[in-house]
Amino acid sequence: TMSTFANDLKKEKGYSTAYLGKWHLDGDNKPGVLSGNSENTKRKFGFGSNRYRYNRGHWKFMDMKEQKVKVFEFEEGQKNCDCKGGDEKHYTTDFLFDKSIQYMKNKKDSGNPFAVVLSIPDPHGPNIVRKPYNDMYRSMHFSLPYSMRRMAKRKPAGPTWAEDMWSIIVDVSMKQSKKDLDAIEHSELYQSDMNQYYGMVKCIDDNVGKMRRFLKKNNIYDNTIIVFTSDHGDLLGEHGRKNKGLAYRTSAGIPFLMSYPNKIRKGKIITTPYTTVDFAPSILNMVGITTDETKFDGIDFTEELLNNNLVTKNEDQIRFIRGKNWIGAITQRFKLVISSTDVPWMFDMQNDHVELMNNFETEEFADVRERLLDALYKEIIEDDFKFNEMNRFFIYWSMPKCLDSRNAIPGNEEYLCTDIGTGTELGGLPDEICVNGAIKKHCSVSCENCCEDSEGKMLHRRELLGCSELKDYCDEYRVPEFCPVTCGLC
């Protein structure tokens, strides 16, 4: 039998537990709400109550009809909800907070300790929120992020794993990038999206305040652990992208704000990297539950939470993350990203807060790079770190010897290496431009200035292979680029 966070709270300390809001662990059921007064007993994962839980979707209004939970999209909710008490009672954020507070009041009155997981769907697209939050930031002008403008000009270009259907700059021309980007910034769509997004956040903020006031009024605030966190960020135009799914801090980085006045020092800051799997063993330990039998995957960081240092960090700790086509290793300062679509990237998050520059080959950081590569490979091999469909690809574990830069060409900043040889009549550049030494170095492949086997390795099916071991794989994507001599390209 699998034990869970909620199971351990009930079994070891007698906690009453509830889960409200989005669940996303019950298959394809959408919305997957419950009927009548019933509880879904088959998929509760230890939680005592899941009456106001739903599985999928980003519903903007919720209501109870004949003891049945109903969910509505925004326009449908305003037309058909028939919500008594107005939007402020039935907008999903407000509804779920009120039900959570009611649950805590009932358990407090009965004398039982309680644990509530409140999963708020906002802020999330569609970016739309109830009054008065929908116009609260209308007077503000939202500028495009610095990283979007830099990447649109390819100064520098970003990783290929940052380019997909969610790209905002896919149609931005390098030759008129300022004009195209200004048009995006001043569009009603962009300004309205940002206004409504900030409104959703403000609505959540006000409801957090409401919950804190309830705890204080009932004299249980100082002895209650409050955690505010998320499953992912939203890029909101950073790096030319919206939504989620990337290794950047604004996507993969999440808040982890804690309040526990009786035990955690006020104003404490922890910069050690942690991930969501570290939540359960740490919180359980804080309430006096050891997790030896349950064997959670995460790290217990209770000691760092409870020590008296105002600022703490462990520069040596490494944690791991993954996306659809990338895997990563992170320390307090550095982030290594290996992907099936690009060369390795390593960010220095201390000196490059917006994560624009690739420091994978920076000699100063060679020791850090090797330590992160070793740790990531160990995680892949020993701990069976899953990396989805990447397993079937040949992946750059090292930088190829011969490589065109993806940045704009120096002195010809409206062009890329891929424009060389396409002919001026097609808007490209002639081959003769390669006589320029700087361009020849910048575009070593397009200028036919390099044909050497790479000295490093490629990752394939959990094996690291050099060119001597890749000679039988020259028909595979990217192998000839890594081993052009071995594969007979020159």
Image (cartoon, rainbow, N blue to C red):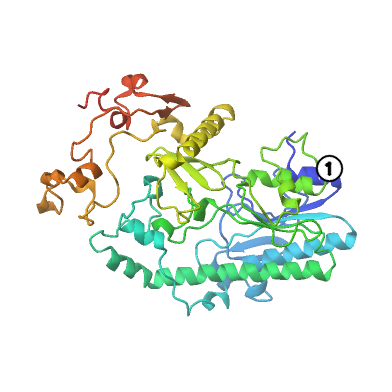
Q: Which residue reaches farthest front? A: 364
Residue at x 40% of width, y 37% of height: 340
Q: Is residue 311 left or right of residue 244?
A: right
Question: Which one is nearer the viewer's eye here, 455 or 201?
Answer: 455
- Element assignment for label 1: helix
Q: Which residue reaches farthest right? A: 111
Instruction: Classify 86 as above or below 453.
Output: below
Residue at x 63% of width, y 60% of height: 120
Residue at x 44% of width, y 44% of height: 346
Q: Position of residue 113 (x, y in %)?
A: 84, 55
Tell me, yes or no, if residue 75 can be seen here. Answer: no
Question: Which one is nearer the viewer's eye here, 148 or 195?
Answer: 148
Q: How many marks?
A: 1
Quarter of the image for residue 155 reads bottom left
Q: Is residue 299 left or right of residue 171?
A: right
Quarter of the figure with the N terminus: top right
Q: Which residue is mark 1?
A: 11
Q: Position of residue 188 (x, y in %)?
A: 39, 73
Residue at x 41% of width, y 56% of height: 239
Q: Position of residue 288 (x, y in %)?
A: 83, 46
Quarter of the image for residue 2 reads top right
Tell me, yes or no, if residue 286 can be seen here. Answer: yes
Instruction: Classify 195 as above or below 426.
Output: below
Instruction: Classify 266 as above or below 347.
Output: below
